[in-house]
Amino acid sequence: MHSLYDTPAQAPALYPDLLWKPRAASNPAMLRQSWVRRYDKATLGTGYATPARIAEALCAFLPDTDQSVLDYDCGTGVLGLALQAAGCTDITGIDPSEVLIARAQARGVYRDLHRIQPGYEMLREGRWAAIATAGSLGLGPVGPCQVERLTRALMPGGLLALAVPDYCTSAGISARAVEATLDSGAMQQLFREHGAHLPALCQGSTVIILQKS
């Protein structure tokens, strides 16, 4: 299946145009808070399938679901819910937006929730057994430059679970970020599968599981 929305210009009107403009992520919190009121409608209201796909794929490779999992760029906690449903018991969420963190807190699935800040201790080198992110890779609030950063935050053998929506894949940026990480030898790919993203909008995404060398 291929998405009907192959470029940022074709992305659904529920998403603000600002999200699809290439830029440095200098103030992701302000950007995210500008569209938070539309977030759940734009995702859950359209059958958001990617979080469950990420969680199921990650848990298939995670040796122990009691290991610490970081939900990076956690938003309102939709991925956290999926991780819990898949069997994860130790989930920490981080996000640049206090507004979104408050919504995630209400889910009741996170051991801890923190706001992302420059040089943040939660992303220190070698800390996490697994990191999952549903929305940060692409032309969105955080951007593909985070792949290298998240790789460093994994312990040796740690897993990175992510998804790239079709409308970001067509721009090439996300694909280049993942391929560069693989080419460097820092990570190896364990899993890659295309499937539903926002079914009501006929959108797909590719779920990828990488393991730190």
Image: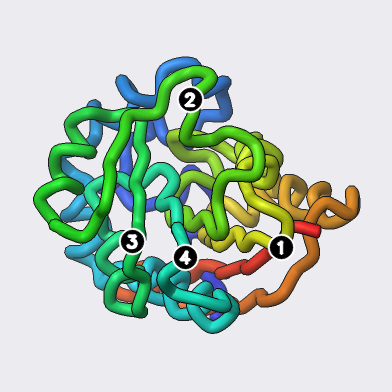
Q: x, y percentage for residue 190?
A: 71, 75
Crowding around mark 2 (Cα neighbors within 10 Å: few <14, some 14 to 19, many 20+) is few
Q: Nearer the viewer, mark 3 or mark 4?
A: 4
Q: Would you name the residue on which mark 4 appears?
A: 67
User: Residue 118 or 178: which is nearer the viewer?
Assistant: 118
Q: Mark 3 or 2 closer to N-term?
A: 3
- Residue 79 tag number: 3
Task: Check if mark 3's residue and mark 2's residue have beta carbons within 8 Å.
Answer: no
Q: Mark 3 or 1 closer to N-term?
A: 3
- Residue 120 tag number: 2
User: Under tag 3, what secondary structure?
Assistant: helix
Q: Label 4 sits on what residue type?
A: Gln
Q: Give me the C-alpha separation between circle 4 and circle 2.
A: 21 Å
User: Under tag 2, what secondary structure?
Assistant: loop
Horizontal arrangement in the rendering, residue 187 relative to residue 81 (left or right): right
Q: Quadrant of residue 206?
A: bottom right
User: Residue 156 or 74: which is nearer the viewer?
Assistant: 156
